Amino acid sequence: MEKEEELNNLRLQIERDNPSPELKEQATQLVFGDGSIDADILFIGEAPGKKEDISGTPFVGRAGKFLNEMLEKINLSREDVYITNIVKYRPLNNRDPLNNEKQAFLPYLIKQINIIKPRLIITLGRHSMNCFLPEHRISEAHGKLTNTLYKYEDKEYEYNILPLFHPAAAIYNQSLKGSLVEDFLTIPKILSELTTK
């Protein structure tokens, strides 16, 4: 089965299973993912915001614009990477996703990752980082590559995780913005090292 078909089936499965009825009820639509299904880099955010909820595409608001600008700095575009969130429906008033909401969507996120098979997973913000690296603090872990064996449903997956600050947080905090841009600029070198391994 082709990747595209697998991802379409996964999307339909989420809609069928309805892992979080409360979120779905007040959202406009499912925000599944966007970009190249053969990407070496997969970005994982937290949950869709208002603009994402309307468009059905992740990271299209101010944070998305900032993400696009940073991708340009390393000679990439959205078409070269894949972007998704842990939670696929917008939480009301853009609040942080709750633990039970993240847990409800996690099985689908793992399937999404394993279909795309990226070399590098970049988590944006502490919520997505903590799904894979629960003991880490974003203030200390940002910009540091971690190779982790992720256990899920009796299976073990090897993921290369690079935690970064969330672009939305960086917009409101200049010191975070500097750190995020600095960390972002290391992505090509990290990817090159992973490719030659």
Image (tube, grey):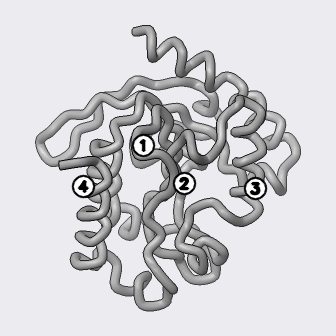
Cα separation between marks 4 and 3: 29 Å
Does dot 2 land on a helix, a strand or a loop? strand
In the image, residue 37 above or below residue 181: below
- Residue at numbered disc 3: 65
Earlier-in-chain disc, 3 versus 1: 3
Earlier-in-chain disc, 4 versus 1: 4
In this rendering, the label closer to the viewer, 4 or 3: 4
| Circle 3: residue type | Lys
Cα separation between marks 3 and 1: 28 Å
- Residue at numbered disc 4: 6
- Residue at numbered disc 2: 45
Crowd band around label 1 with a 10 angstrom C-alpha radius: few (<14), some (14–19), many (20+): few
In this rendering, the label closer to the viewer, 2 or 1: 2
In this rendering, the label closer to the viewer, 2 or 4: 4
- Image x and y of residue 190, in percent: 56, 19
| Circle 2: residue type | Gly
Cα separation between marks 4 and 1: 28 Å
Q: What mark, if any, has residue 134 been given in the picture?
A: 1
